[in-house]
Image (cartoon, rainbow, N blue to C red):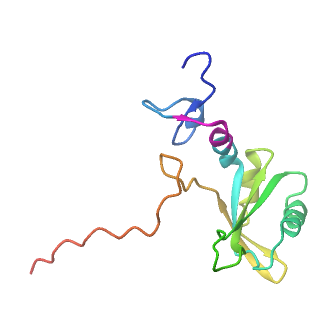
Amino acid sequence: MNGQDKSISCMRGRDSHLKPRKGARNITKDQQAYLERLPRQIFVGGLPSAITDSRFQQWADETFPGEVEDVQIIFTKNYETAPVRPRGFGFITFHNLSYVDVALEVRHRPFGTKTVELKKAVDCRDSKGKPRNKDRAAPPAAPAHD
């Protein structure tokens, strides 16, 4: 990279943030920030449909005192025919990578009258930074031989 190029090479795999991938493409600062934040995030599934940012932040701060850097609720896309609403899951980013394993020692935690599930956050984007298409058709089954 030359001295004026401010982007960094995209990487994959465990500890891949330490070295660029061979033949990697350049990524933006926002993408790099996302990749640096991802290992410190957990997925929280089963959130109530009436969840608010402030309530999620309050729960995270009470559940993991002093460790939470940020919370994010995932909402539906803004379609003309449907209102924007929470999709029932979100993410918690911790200040310290070491706290992720501590947080995941208990996989199910109470959230009001519901129980939420905690998992390690994973990158759901393809190599071009776009969301993966989970609706792809399965490959055709091999013909049965009698």
Drawn side of residue 104 relative to residue 124, left or right: right
Query: Is 40 located above or below residue 46 in the figure?
Result: above
Residue 113 seen by the camera: yes
Residue furthest front in the image: 80
Q: How many marks?
A: 0
Please state the extent of the stretch shown in magenta in the rendering: 26-33
Q: Name the residue rendered at 71%, 48% in the picture.
A: 40
Query: Is 80 located above or below residue 54 in the figure?
Result: below
Q: Position of residue 91 (x, y in %)?
A: 72, 60
Drawn side of residue 68 relative to residue 44, left or right: right
Q: Position of residue 144 (x, y in %)?
A: 15, 78
Residue 119 among those drawn in magenta: no
Q: Position of residue 3 (x, y in %)?
A: 61, 15
Residue 29 among those drawn in magenta: yes
Question: Which quadrant does the N terminus fall into?
Answer: top right
Residue furthest left in the image: 146
Residue 45 seen by the camera: no
Q: Position of residue 41 (x, y in %)?
A: 70, 53
Question: 93 or 85, which is in the foreground?
Answer: 85
Residue furthest top in the image: 3
- Which quadrant of the structure image shows residue 124? bottom right
Question: 114 or 30, which is in the foreground?
Answer: 30
- Which quadrant of the structure image shows residue 82? bottom right
Judged by its main secondary structure, the magenta piece is: helix
Question: Which quadrant does the C terminus fall into?
Answer: bottom left
Drawn side of residue 90 relative to residue 22, left or right: right
Q: Name the residue rendered at 76%, 78% in the picture.
A: 48
